[in-house]
């Protein structure tokens, strides 16, 4: 019951925040269209109760602007732009139960700020539900200019506190991955598409570490030698679902896993520094050694 109410509070905050200014009638219309309403209207009295609850629990003030038709808005919307509360509302609803029960500790519960990609998350999910194409203006990290194009939204994925969209662009007939925080503008079109029955989101990423999918890189059995203290980290947070621990000594552990060694996976290995050694395959061991030497050479030049 409590978690259901929390979902409703989150829905209300998101609806008003996204609209910026919205009447109760418009809120009620959107509420009826949402799945959590179960097709029932939102009584005005209930709406005001939720307003009070949102302020008491989350510190978000929903005010009413009486000029021009009684429009509601979030008076301290800047609180949602800082990342903490808003990201918690959107991505960690389960944590909110703890925060509600421990409001006296709210200043001692620190939340990580993440990019604002979830601005478009609700619309993308709505487009996925309806089977509608979206038009996005996208600013790649690797290009100076943005591009606008149509995408068939297949699925979304959260990875390392960032949301990603997986979809097919009819322009090049390829399934690509887009970071939501790199989307500058987006609209949901009326153009329909059929979700391919053969596409399974979990299978799409199954043999990869993160969100870089490259079929030109073969899957490899990778063996790692990890210091005993760092091995505890890998046991708690495995690099991949295929990871297994083959050997354990007082000084180190040996792990095996099978993945496509893409750029993001290699960067993850490098992050562990001297605590991790690639034993095989040999080409990956040499590639990592080359990168380490290049880093070392840069520091030598500064001396």
Image: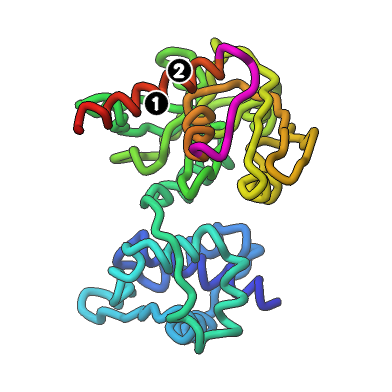
- Label 1 CA crowd tier, 10 Å (few <14, some 14–19, many 20+): many
Closer to the camera, 93 or 190? 93
Which quadrant of the structure image shows residue 222?
Answer: top right
Rendering coords of residue 15 (x, y %):
43, 63
Is residue 4 highlighted in magenta?
A: no
**Quarter-wise, where is residue 41 in the image?**
bottom right
Q: In this view, does 114 lie to the left or right of 193?
A: left
> Which residue lies under the disc numbered 1?
150
133 lies above or below 4: above
In the depicted structure, whether residue 53 falls above or below residue 275: below
Residue at image position (67%, 46%) is 228
Query: Residue at left 72%, top 33%?
Result: 254
Q: Quadrant of the N terminus?
A: bottom right
Which secondary structure, mark 2? loop
Question: Quick one: 35 or 169, which is closer to the camera?
Answer: 169
The magenta segment is 273-283
Secondary structure beneath dot 1 equals strand
Count the marks: 2
Q: Find disc 2 in the rendering and name its residue.
A: 170
Q: In which quarter of the image is the C terminus?
A: top left
Image position of 302 (left or right of 31):
left
- Dots 1 and 2: beta carbons under 8 Å? yes
């Amino acid at each position: 019951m409590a978690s259901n109410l929390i979902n409703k509070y989150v829905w209300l905050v998101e609806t008003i925040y996204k609209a910026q200014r919205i009447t109760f009638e418009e809120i009620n219309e959107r509420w009826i269209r949402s799945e959590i309403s179960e097709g029932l209207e939102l009584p005005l009295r209930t709406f005001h109760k939720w307003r009070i609850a949102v302020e008491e629990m989350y510190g978000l003030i929903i005010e009413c602007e009486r000029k021009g038709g009684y429009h509601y808005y979030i008076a301290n919307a800047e609180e949602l732009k800082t990342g903490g509360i808003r990201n918690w509302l959107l991505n960690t609803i389960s944590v909110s139960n703890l925060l509600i029960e421990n409001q006296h500790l709210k200043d001692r519960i620190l939340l990580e700020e993440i990019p604002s990609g979830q601005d478009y998350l609700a619309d993308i999910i709505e487009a996925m539900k309806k089977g509608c194409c979206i038009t996005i203006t996208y600013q790649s990290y690797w290009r100076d200019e943005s591009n606008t194009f149509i995408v068939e939204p297949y699925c979304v994925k959260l990875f390392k506190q960032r949301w990603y969209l997986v979809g097919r662009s009819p322009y090049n007939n390829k399934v690509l991955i887009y970071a939501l925080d790199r989307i500058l503008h987006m609209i949901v079109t009326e153009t329909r598409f059929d979700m391919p029955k053969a596409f399974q989101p979990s299978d799409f990423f199954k043999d990869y570490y993160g969100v870089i999918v490259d079929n030109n890189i073969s899957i490899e059995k990778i063996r790692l030698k990890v210091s005993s203290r760092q091995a505890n980290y890998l046991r708690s947070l495995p690099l991949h679902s295929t990871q297994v621990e083959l050997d354990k000594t007082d000084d180190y552990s040996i792990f095996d896993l099978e993945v496509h060694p893409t750029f993001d996976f290699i960067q993850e290995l490098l992050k562990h520094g001297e605590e991790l050694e690639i034993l095989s395959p040999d080409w990956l061991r040499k590639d990592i050694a080359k990168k380490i030497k290049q880093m070392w050479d840069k520091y030598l030049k500064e001396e």
